[in-house]
Amino acid sequence: MIKKLSGDNLSDTFLIIKSVIDKMTDEMIHQWDEIYPGLEVLEQDIMNGEAYGLFSLNELKGFVVLNEKYSLEYDSLDWATVGGKSLIIHRLSVKASCQGQGIATTLMNFSEKYAKENGYSSIKLDAFLDNKTALNLYEKRGYHKVGTVTFRKGLFNCYEKVINS
């Protein structure tokens, strides 16, 4: 079951992020750290009503943040959709012990359905260049690479998927 997260879920979302950071660090992927995404970022996601979690047996196993906010670096790219409303995916995370169970796919299915139901013309996101798992997930789902931008931790591919009504 996927539902909007509440303040009661804040500590669980932070534990998921910590587990993901530990696993990525073990795999030499230095995308996230103690600075980002921090507790304050996750709290804002939840308080803004933009975080959605996948629960199984009352356990939060993963979450995604959906909104229309994007980094200024996106402005330098040649997106397929211009002038339409775009949904931006942030912080797709699956608890390290639950990875490989299709949770990220389920969260992406939810995100794409959300975009269609809410009149978005496209979905945009970025993924760390060294995070091959994320890059493969998005490319297999038909997201097209639009370009590469630099954030604090390095290079990120930016992707877009046009939504057909």
Image (cartoon, helix red, strand yellow):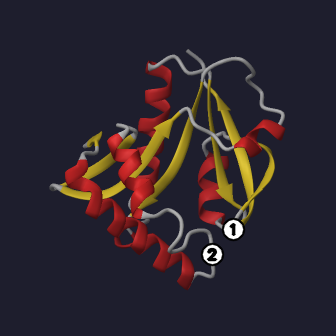
Q: Give whichever of 72, 157 is nearer the camera.
A: 72
Q: Quadrant of residue 86?
A: top right
Residue drawn where x is 39% and y is 62% of the image: 39
Q: Percent x, y for residue 16?
A: 36, 66
Numbered circles on residues, count: 2
Screen quadrant of the N terminus: top left
Q: Percent x, y for residue 127?
A: 65, 55
In the depicted structure, whether residue 120 falls above or below residue 126: above
Which residue corresponds to mark 2?
A: 30
Whether pointer 1 and pointer 2 mark residues with C-beta atoms closer than 8 Å, the reply is: yes
Amino acid type of disc 2? Answer: His
Residue drawn where x is 33% and y is 69% of the image: 15
Tell me the CA gap for discs 1 and 2.
7 Å
Amino acid type of disc 1? Answer: Lys
**Precedes in sequence: disc 1 or disc 2:** 2
Which residue corresponds to mark 1?
A: 153
